[in-house]
Structures are given as structure tokens and as C-alpha cells.
Amino acid sequence: MRIWDIEPKLLCRKHLAAEHRELHGLWNILTLGKKGYARHPETLRWVGKLAALYWRHESLVAEMARRKWRHATPLDAGRAIGLSVQRTYIDAPARQRAILHEKPCDCFKA
């Protein structure tokens, strides 16, 4: 599970779609009490930051729209409470960029 902290426009098709899917799973864990990956470090860094997670989703949706993708899974804005900025990282954004550069994908070329 990974929610990136870099601009969605830099993500390749595969990573953009995967992050969107994983964000919805994370949202359900945090808002509906699903067990899944409830103790995963990526989940724990978003506890108390649903507003930030909501805005990350909206930035992904904006990028999806820019790429002319259809989006049909909005989040409930009424649940977007807590801190609106994420400043806790498992890997700092610079490291995240390096991780993506090492992958055999089209990130940074989208």
C-alpha cells in the first residue's frame, strides 16, 4: 500500500490508477473501521488527517480528468476532518521520486 506525496501529473498510468484504488481502500479503513491494513505504516500516517487524504484524492481525480479518464467514486467530503496537510512520511518526497525513477515504468513522462 502506498500513497505518494508527489504531484499526480508525474505518475504513470499504472501508478496513478493503483494509488487511486489504494486510497479508496485506505479511506474505508479509516472511515468505516475496516480491518484490512489498519496497522500498516501507510495507514497509520493518515490517522487524524482525513482532510489531507481527501485533498490527495481530489488531486488524483483532477489528474485523471486531465488524462480524460472517467471517475465515478467520489469520497464523502463530510468525513474529511482532521489535518488538511500531510507532513508525516515513510519516505520523504525526494526519496519517493528516486523510488519511482528506479521502477521500469513511465513515471515522470506522463
Image: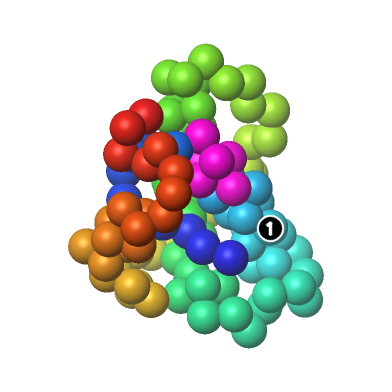
Q: Is residue 92 above or below residue 9?
A: below
Q: Is residue 75 left or right of residue 87?
A: right
- x, y percent for residue 15: 51, 45
Q: Is residue 73 left or right of residue 66?
A: right
> Is residue 15 found inside the magenta-colored segment of the image?
yes
Identify the magenta region. Answer: 13-18
Residue shown at 75%/64% (left/top)? Answer: 32
Q: Is residue 106 above or below residue 100?
A: above
Q: For residue 97, which quarter of the picture?
A: bottom left
Of residue 52 and residue 41, the one placed in the foreground of this image is: 41
Q: Is residue 77 visible?
A: no
Residue carrying label 1: 25
Quadrant where the image shows the C terminus: top left
Specify the farthest residue to the bottom: 39
Residue shown at 59%/48% (left/top)? Answer: 18
- x, y percent for residue 33: 75, 71
Q: For residue 79, which quarter of the picture?
A: bottom right
Quadrant where the image shows the N terminus: bottom right
Q: Is residue 45 visible?
A: yes
The majority secondary structure of the magenta stretch comes to helix
Q: Quick one: SS at disc 1?
A: helix
